Image (cartoon, rainbow, N blue to C red):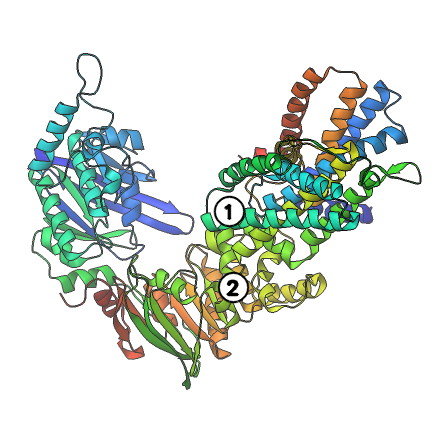
Amino acid sequence: MRENILLEVKQCSKSFPGVKAFNKVDFDLYKGEIHCVVGENGAGKTTFIKMLSGALHPDEGTIKIAGKEYTHLNPALAHQLGIQTIYQELSLAQDLTVAENIFIGNWPTNRFGLVDYERLNNEAKRLLDNLKINLDVEALVRTLNVPQKQSVQIAKAMATEAKIFILDEPTAAYSTSEISNLLGLVQKCAENGIGVIYISHHLEEVFDIHDRITVLRDGNKITTHGKNEAAPEMIIREMVGRDVSKFYTRQKVAIDYSKVIEFQNFSDGDMVRGVSFKTYKGEILGLAGMVGSGRTELSRLIFGADTRISGSITIEGNKVEINNPKDAICKGFALLTEDRQKTGLILQHSVEWNTMLAHLNNTNGVFIKEKTESQNIRHYIKTLDIKTPSIKQIMKNLSGGNQQKVVLAKWLYANANIVLFDEPTRGIDIGSKEEIYKAMVDLAKHGKYILMISSDMPELIAMCDRIVVMRKGEITKVLEKEQISEENILTYSIGGTI
Amino acid sequence: MKNIFAKNKKLARWMSRGNKSVLYLFVIILFAMLVMSLLEPKFFTARNLFNILNQQSTLGIATMGVAIAMISGCIDLTIGNLLASTAAVAALLLNAEVNVFLVILLTCLSGLAAGFFNGLIVVKTRINTFIATLGLMSVYQGLALIIPRGNNIYLKGKLADFGTYRVAGLVPVPIFYFVTIAAIAYLVMRYTKFGRRLYSIGGNPETAYLAGINLDRNKIIAYAISGFLASFTSLIVISRIGQSQPAMGVAYPLESIAAAVIGGVALSGGRGSIPGVFLGVILLGLIRNSLNILRVQSFYQYVMLGVVIVIAVTLSNIGSIKKL
């Protein structure tokens, strides 16, 4: 068995400012094995992949491949050592054929130095047949769908001297038959002697194909199970298992159950499918689900930022028509997006500028009343305790937490009544986190409606009065206060009762 | 002592607000003027300085429009040929004995409409603005030939005062147009919600959209302003040269973009100020005038102008280059 070992990770650690993303993890992989890695969002899976593909360097520990020890890899070295990370559609040349892509840069040539297409196509055909992939080798990659492109990726990786495949959430947005095709293909690769690291939120898939399962939690390896050693419930428990009570305790707010907003049948024809739910005045309603479950898409749909194929909103008995963000803002909606730098702020402009951006919709007149604006903005800076030398400071120079508070100030200033928070505390320090929580509870106290999307479970559990759980664009469960627990959230996020 | 310190702080803050390039530019212009005054006594005379301003007023007015579009993240390459088209419209109307004021009004309206159309095309097709206006540029090149049937149209003295009148016998009237339009542009971009929206769209369209700003409408208006100012420019030009020519204005698109960029406007949008653009236009004129006075042959002038543009842009963007 020892001589079949492909990869040995020993005591690897990686820290980011404020977070230990990966903590003294051991991991190994054998030839022909499918080794699944599971864990919540933020458990360290992405860090792990990035270290293996050479994008991140571990702070300590070693990675041993083919009998040689390395303190870190870089992308070129990882490639040379036969580690292939397979993405859904990146890194294929769209306007070359399937065969050309599979042997890209390494095409067989005839004696004039020109590409020998007959040999190229035959070899590609042989490779695809061997993997039982049913594709025309002369089709342009552009014309393929995502699962087909992914199989081309896998075939391409097989054509190189790859020994280790890493698949990260390979089945996102796949249909059932497409998933089973992919799983078959992965097993075929393993039969050919490839070691596969398979990362997925979907436990059914994992249980279908695994040889071993490793559970990560908060950057630690919890355990590794052999084939059919553990039941799904046990894995879920291991993925969760942390002390919740230590977390932030919020103030209780009386909810007014007579005032309600109903969201009916929201669909975008792709990531969100027929979502309906309601929320009450003064309530903080959580939206849970794994990455890719359609939560962010739902929030943008509600806000009118993307085109919907169906969906209507009734605010306290009045149906409202929202077709673009401006409509939404005028109806009292606010959206704090998950990526504040890309979609929440204008980084090269000042604190003042960013804060008044949405408020401008509510003012009359042609000119900006700078004096009044500055005064009002200073008030928000004080109440939210935004640390900035002046309101003229450029956003770029503020810390993540203060940037997020400016985004919040923007919506408070716009007098928002229904606030959608998408990952409001991602990547910000603990102090700022608590201030954001406090601001959210304050909003609830003032009778606002609050929707909170978060992948941080302790945060959701501490903050939310009820939690809507989504999976693959649909609501799988609405958890009442007394039902909220990490086990329940996780169970409904990754595939209900398996 | 304390007072000086406070002033320095204020200055530092003013600089950090993206006014650095304006200051650099101002220093460069002063330096160039100093050098020229030492080299050539004819340079630093009221007549010559007014001459520079007068020369640059046409490019300057058109550049204001181009800069406004650029700040909202849109390139407008059409202005040169658009200007030639509206010049032909104006010349034909004048020769048809239409009232001068009506001609001015109609010409500006045609420029406004053309700019509106440009904006509509850019916004609705969602083509990269550089490519879209490159295509439209050719459309206006055609129109500039079609409208006057390929001919130069002579004004025979009509509209002469519009671009050549000297206030108090000294200051050419186009300088007043330029300064007034620059001042209005400054007010609009600096103090109105509309200006703020254009900066926001250029700075981060996604954020602007999610803050309720209508991207399409504001971009269309920016193009309409650019078209309007180009047509206004065309009136000054035909008044000066006494005729409309189908090939006039070809250098405008690139020169106006160069002037705006020298003035600190980012090609990607969101950054730049009207005072900066104003100085950018002045600097270009200053250089051309200096080369003329120093009797540099016109062939060499092109080369030197190009070199100076590159150097000036490098110098005025020195702060942001360091960060790369």
Pinpoint residue A14: horizontal percent, then vertical percent.
Answer: 34, 44
- Disc 2: CA contacts within 10 A as few (<14), some (14-19) or many (>=20): many
Q: Amino acid at mark 1?
A: Val
Q: Nearer the viewer, residue A281 or B61?
A: B61
Pinpoint residue B295: horizontal percent, then vertical percent.
Answer: 79, 16
Disc 1 is placed on an element classified as helix
Does B103 sit above or below residue A297?
A: above
Q: Residue at x 85, y 19 (%)?
A: B40
Q: Residue at x 59, y 43 (%)?
A: B70
Q: Amino acid at mark 2?
A: Leu
Displayed quadrant of residue A289:
bottom left
Q: Nearer the viewer, residue A211 or A113?
A: A113
Q: Residue at x 78, y 33 (%)?
A: B242
Does B182 sit above or below residue A91?
A: below
* Residue beneath disc 2: A408
Disc 2 is placed on an element classified as helix
In the rendered image, is residue B223 in sight? no
Q: In the image, is B221 to the left or to the right of B43?
A: left
Q: In the image, is A204 to the left or to the right of A272?
A: left
Q: Given the image, what chain letter belongs to the residue carrying mark 1?
A: B
- How far is disc 1 from disc 2 in space, using C-alphas? 33 Å
Q: Nearer the viewer, residue A19 or B49?
A: B49
Pinpoint residue A465: horizontal percent, then vertical percent.
Answer: 36, 76
Q: What label sits on residue B122 in the rendered view?
A: 1
Pinpoint residue B289: horizontal percent, then vertical percent.
Answer: 78, 25
Q: Nearer the viewer, residue A280 or A462?
A: A280
